[in-house]
């Protein structure tokens, strides 16, 4: 039975995942498609697109604008603000889920990936920039900008991710994927440094300055997106054109996508992974979307939220690189599962920490709360975390942050190892779909439970359900054997 592009239908065990002793193992010096890898500078240039996107996903959506939205834009009630932020993320996730697989299937038929990266990045930029005009009470404008910036930027990442299996040696795809995530965090770190410096340019934070520093996160993210996509465009090789017209690509893309969905049984191992990743990734992204809001509400943090975010991404950047090395040695699946367990434990401990108690059961008197953690307390107090529960929250958050990078980068690596070489973008479109198919569910559920119970902690409890279900499903996924080193 032929595929849409005429290639014979094969199970994934014979396409890219040699799971038996007789199955061929790709030469580690070649890509998964059997081609010559890109040069080291070209691969490094590929990671710069993630440097470009880090400020939007980390600085703006997690630690700066999310808190500004919940605490200022939605006037009067941070609990309602968390709920509205959940609804906004839910709508964005639904649109991304609907568009991603179609865009990915079309991309495979067209060939080159760079045009899609550029097109959708440029479509996202105006909406990032427009966040500058969002003030108190501008709920609708803020939501529209976040929804469409998220949609277009996520579509750009389909094309970027689809380049990975074609440019990396088969036995180095893990470290390159991890390097991309590390660059994302590095871009966020640099953007944070610039963001902290905005008051020196007259863009201070707070109501007296019109919240200029907070609003400036949008144009700052747009600037990074435009500037740091250039290395990829100039240095990274691209897939050649197939010669098909755009209209023919659209028709063939739909045909291929529907054909793949009809023959889903032939890809059951990939489907199992995609479903597992869909669920645990939803839990992880919900943490990112709400942790800044939660910390700001519990501890009264303002600029401290950004400092906390900076500490987390520094550790995540370092651990992403280490995780990539480990991934190439022990496998993506094991790396993901260990990361999910430790990350969940750290999150649970932090949700049980507030100004008056540690880890749910340890009550703190005012004298206890004013104490300092040994060794690290003296380092944290000068940067705004001068109470014991704040310091515990930060330290546990940093430990959890060590496992964010590996969980995310190894998920992409496993997808690159599983995807058929001639359908990479299509499967990354499905990867994006399954990363977003329920992405509206967790934020919406958190929003509903938060608003119903008037309790942020209760709302965030949803996260553990998603991570646990995803973990169990992932345990049944069969990972391809790694190429000989």
Image: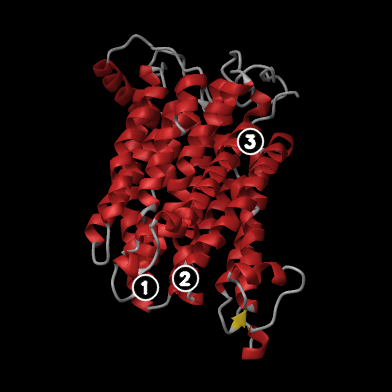
Side (left or right) of 210 relative to 63: left
Q: Are marks 1 and 2 in contact (CB under 8 Å)?
A: yes
Name which quarter of the figure residue 479 lies in. Answer: top right
Task: Please identify the quarter of the rendering in which residue 249 is found.
Answer: top left
Of helix, strand and loop, which one carries label 1?
helix
Mark sitting on residue 479: 3
Depth check: give the residue in front, 427 or 7.
427
Secondary-structure class at tag 3: loop
Q: Is residue 32 above or below residue 47?
A: above
Residue 365 seen in render: no
Q: Return the x and y of residue 465 as percentages of the image width and height.
A: 51, 62
Give the residue displayed 66% in from the left and 90% down from the top: 367
Whether 170 is drawn above or below 303: the answer is above
Tell me which residue sits at (31%, 23%) in the image. 255
Closer to the N terminus: mark 1 or mark 2? Answer: 1
The answer to whether 327 appears left or right of 354 in the picture is right
Q: CA distance from mark 1 to mark 3?
A: 43 Å
As drawn, the label of residue 78 is 1
Quadrant for the N terminus, please: top left
The earlier-in-sequence mark between 2 and 3 is 2
Q: Is residue 152 visible?
A: yes
Q: Mark 3 or mark 1, which is nearer the start of the sequence?
A: 1
Quadrant where the C terminus lies?
Answer: top right
Label number found at residue 296: 2
| Left or right: 160, with 322 as reference point | left
Residue 316 at x, y percent in the picture: 61, 50
């Amino acid at each position: 039975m032929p595929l849409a592009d005429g290639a014979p239908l094969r199970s994934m065990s014979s396409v890219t995942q040699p799971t038996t002793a007789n199955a061929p193992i790709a030469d580690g010096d070649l890509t998964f498609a059997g081609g010559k890898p890109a040069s080291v500078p070209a691969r490094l240039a590929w990671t710069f697109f993630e440097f470009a996107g880090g400020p939007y996903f980390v600085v703006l959506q997690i630690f700066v604008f999310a808190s500004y939205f919940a605490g200022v834009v939605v006037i009067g009630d941070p609990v309602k603000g968390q709920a509205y932020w959940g609804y906004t993320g839910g709508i964005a996730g639904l649109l991304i889920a609907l568009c991603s697989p179609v865009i990915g299937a079309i991309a495979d038929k067209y060939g080159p990936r760079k045009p899609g990266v550029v097109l959708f990045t440029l479509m996202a930029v105006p909406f990032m920039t427009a966040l500058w005009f969002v003030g108190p009470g501008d709920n609708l404008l803020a939501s529209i900008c976040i929804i469409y910036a998220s949609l277009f930027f996520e579509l750009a990442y389909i094309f970027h991710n689809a380049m990975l299996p074609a440019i990396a040696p088969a036995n180095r795809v893990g470290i390159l994927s991890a390097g991309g995530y590390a660059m994302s965090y590095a871009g966020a770190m640099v953007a944070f440094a610039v963001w902290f410096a905005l008051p020196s340019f007259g863009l201070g934070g707070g109501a007296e300055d019109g919240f200029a520093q907070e609003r400036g996160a949008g144009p700052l993210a747009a600037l990074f997106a435009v500037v740091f996509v250039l290395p990829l465009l100039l240095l990274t090789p691209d897939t050649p054109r197939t010669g098909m017209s755009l209209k023919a690509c659209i028709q063939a893309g739909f045909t291929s996508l529907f054909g793949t969905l009809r023959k889903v049984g032939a890809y059951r191992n990939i489907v199992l992974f995609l479903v597992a990743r869909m669920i645990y990734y939803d839990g992880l992204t919900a943490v990112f979307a709400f942790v800044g809001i939660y910390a700001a509400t519990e501890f009264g943090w303002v600029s401290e939220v950004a400092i906390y975010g900076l500490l987390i991404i520094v550790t995540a950047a370092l651990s992403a690189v280490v995780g990539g090395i480990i991934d190439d040695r022990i496998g993506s699946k094991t790396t993901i599962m260990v990361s999910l367990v430790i990350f969940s434990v750290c999150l649970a401990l932090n949700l049980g920490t507030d100004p008056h108690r540690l880890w749910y059961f340890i009550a703190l008197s005012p004298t206890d709360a004013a104490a300092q953690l040994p060794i690290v307390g003296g380092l944290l107090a000068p940067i705004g975390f001068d109470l014991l529960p704040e310091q515990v929250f930060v330290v546990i958050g940093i430990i959890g942050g060590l496992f964010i990078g590996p969980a995310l980068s190894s998920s992409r690596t496993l997808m690159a190892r599983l995807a058929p070489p001639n359908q990479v973008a299509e499967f990354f479109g499905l990867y994006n779909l399954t990363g977003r198919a329920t992405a509206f569910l967790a934020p919406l559920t958190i929003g509903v439970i938060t608003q119903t119970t008037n309790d942020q902690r209760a709302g965030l409890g949803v996260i553990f359900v998603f991570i646990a279900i995803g973990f169990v499903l992932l345990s049944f996924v069969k990972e391809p054997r790694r190429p000989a080193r």
